[in-house]
Image: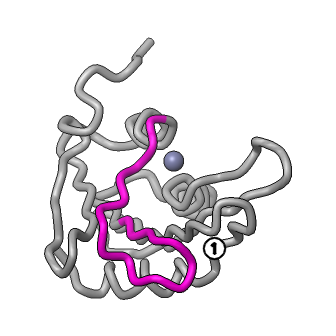
Amino acid sequence: MYKEDIEMAKKARLFSYSPYSNFQVGTTLRTKTGKLYTGCNIENHGIQGICGERTAFAKALSEGERDFESITVVGAKKGEEPTEECMPCGYCRQFMSEFVDENFKIYTLQGNEVKEYTMKELLPYSFKM
Ligand code: ZN
């Protein structure tokens, strides 16, 4: 696990646009070549908001990236430190599974401890055509 990814996710979290939930999420997506793409959640009046995970993937994918190693996710209410685990939602798990293998790592924070999961653990029976 890379400390840098956590720090970048925490900074990206501050760009969150979340006036409805006041829940700010920041992410750092790491490619297999070591490039980092950050993301945050972006809400709107309707239901078309986007989570921090998919924001980071959209940034990376739209620049041609296809090989991903891990994503780090931190989240908490505005003004609070992210000390509780912030897990990817079901939509993001299915979305990410399109582009990663089952060993792709998902990191999140529990207190000061980094928790590590694999894609297979978070989405053992994903939809595939
Ligand atoms: Zn999500």
Choose between 115 and 80: the one closer to the eye: 80
Q: Is residue 114 above or below residue 67?
A: below
Residue 17 lies in quadrant: bottom right
| Magenta residues, start to end | 73-90
Residue 124: x percent and y percent? 23, 27
The residue that appears at 71% across and 51% down in the rendered structure is 49
**Residue denoted by label 1:** 16
Quadrant in the picture for the N terminus: bottom left
The residue that appears at 53% across and 78% down in the rendered structure is 13
- Left or right of residue 30, residue 107 in this image: left
User: Residue 80 magenta-drawn?
Assistant: yes
Please identify the residue farthest to the top as the structure is shown. Answer: 129
The kind of residue tagged 1 is Ser
- Left or right of residue 44, residue 97 in this image: left
Q: Is residue 54 above or below residue 39?
A: above
Residue 39: x percent and y percent? 55, 69
Choose between 108 and 29: the one closer to the eye: 108
Choose between 43 and 61: the one closer to the eye: 43
